[in-house]
Image: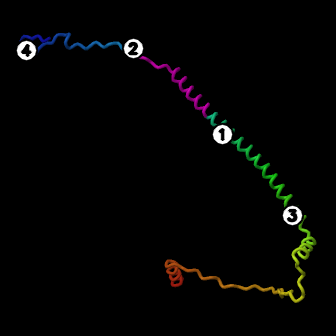
Amino acid sequence: MQVPVYGSSAYKYERESYAKPVRKVVKKVRVRKKNKTAMRGMILLGISVLAAFGILLTNSQILEKNAQIEEMQKKLDTVNAQVVSGQFAIERGMDLGKIEEEAMGRLGMQRPTKAQTVYVDLGNHDYAETVAPKEEKKGLFMLIADNLLEYFG
């Protein structure tokens, strides 16, 4: 409240009006470091568990694929054995005497006569023919470069 001061035009304020306001005591809450470190530990543990799970999953998939590869390799070996035995059976069945007998008997074929035989002279000539190298088509830039090299070189 304002009270006039005698002899001056200034007002004198009562002490209550310009006194500092009283602050309320606020209780500060501190977060314990234990909770933060425990939370960090839990997060790191979770990440490590997920990483271990991922590694185990990947290894199990690799083992499954290896088992499939071994199984397919065994199948391939059996098929290759069948192919080899088939080729052996074909080669065993290819007796030239039997083939000639079958051709003459069932198909009525005959051996060629001397008039039907044609001889070709292959001659053992040891020589080689050289062929001139093909000229490459050159672009405009290469022609200019060659002309400049001839002029200055």
Please name the residue that numbered disc 2 is placed on: 27
Secondary element under disc 2, as helix, strand or loop, is loop
Please name the residue that numbered disc 3 is placed on: 90
Which amino acid type is marked by label 1? Thr
Name the front one of labels 4 and 3: 3
Disc 2 and disc 1: Cα gap in Å? 53 Å
Sooner in the amino-acid sequence: mark 4 or mark 3? 4
Dominant SS type (magenta):
helix
Q: Does the residue at mark 2 contact the one at mark 1 (Cβ under 8 Å)?
A: no
Which amino acid type is marked by label 2? Lys
Residue closest to the eye, 9 or 62: 62
Which amino acid type is marked by label 3? Ile
- x, y (%) of residue 15? 19, 10
Disc 1 and disc 3: Cα gap in Å? 48 Å
* Quadrant of the image occupied by residue 84: bottom right
Which residues fall within the magenta stretch?
28-50
For the point 47% across and 20% down, the residue is 31
Name the front one of labels 1 and 4: 1
For the point 14% across and 11% down, the residue is 1
| Quadrant of the drawing holding the C terminus | bottom right
Sooner in the amino-acid sequence: mark 2 or mark 1? 2
Does 65 sit left or right of 146 as displayed?
A: right
Give yes or no for residue 42 being in the magenta stretch.
yes
Disc 4 and disc 2: Cα gap in Å? 46 Å
